[in-house]
Amino acid sequence: MQARTMVRRLSIGKLLAFIAVLAVSSLTLGADDERENRGNDPFLHVSSAIADCAAPRGPSETAQEWLDEAHYRIERGNSCWIAGRCRLSNSYLYDKEIAESVTRRLNSLNASLQWREKTSLWLTLQRRFIYLDGCVSRDFDTARFVSALGETADVEKVIDRTTRRP
């Protein structure tokens, strides 16, 4: 009879330990789901003329996504230096400078393109690429706007992911 009681107590103890491990694991998983801009990539909200245009997620990611991308990010960042196409050792090092240059360029572009009045836009800068997200009006000249952004010093490519419908 004592052996049976000890087995039950041991089983209850193991069950409680298992529940404790699950509780701690779920707390850890919850923290892992928190999205942050872990690479400190510039993310600019530059206009908001179109109502109901959903904000993009931008460069925010979970800790696990960041770890999953780490090798690829290092490889992409260093490849331009290795190929002799960059003056800096990593293409991500350009992004803050480009963000400042793009901001100045956008201020000079508004008179001719009226982009502030016809768009709700966000720019994400990563490794000399500008990702253009948001909404544009039907009469907005997106091609001309993308071309003008692409003329910014050190920009390798502008990727247009805008929509004409919010």
Image (tube, rainbow, N blue to C red):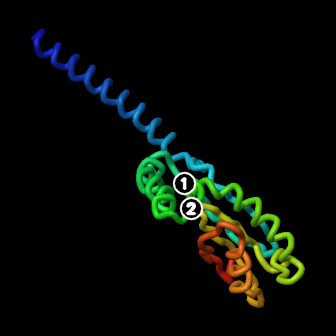
Task: Name the image quarter holding the N terminus.
Answer: top left
Question: What element does badge 1 sit on?
Answer: loop
The residue lying at 57 percent from left, 50 percent from top is 39
Q: Is residue 128 above or below residue 2?
A: below
Residue 114 sits in quarter: bottom right
Residue 108 sits in quarter: bottom right
Q: Residues within 10 Å of mark 1 (few under 14, many from 20)?
A: some
Q: How many marks?
A: 2
Q: Is residue 122 above or below residue 70?
A: below
Report which residue position mark 1 lands on: 90
Residue type, label 1:
Asn
Q: Observer-nearest residue: 12 or 76?
A: 76
| Cα–Cα span, label 1 and label 2 | 8 Å
The residue lying at 30 percent from left, 29 percent from top is 18
Q: Nearer the viewer, mark 1 or mark 2?
A: 2
Residue type, label 2:
Cys
Residue 84 position in % (x across, y down): 50, 63
Residue 19 sits in quarter: top left
Residue 94 position in % (x across, y down): 64, 57
Residue 96 position in % (x across, y down): 69, 55
Q: Observer-nearest residue: 128 or 88?
A: 88
Left or right of 114? Residue 120 is left
| Mark linked to residue 118 | none
Among all residues in the image, which is located at the extreme right? 111
Left or right of 115? Residue 30 is left
The residue lying at 16 percent from left, 18 percent from top is 7
Report which residue position mark 2 lands on: 86
Left or right of 102? Residue 64 is left
The residue lying at 60 percent from left, 67 percent from top is 129
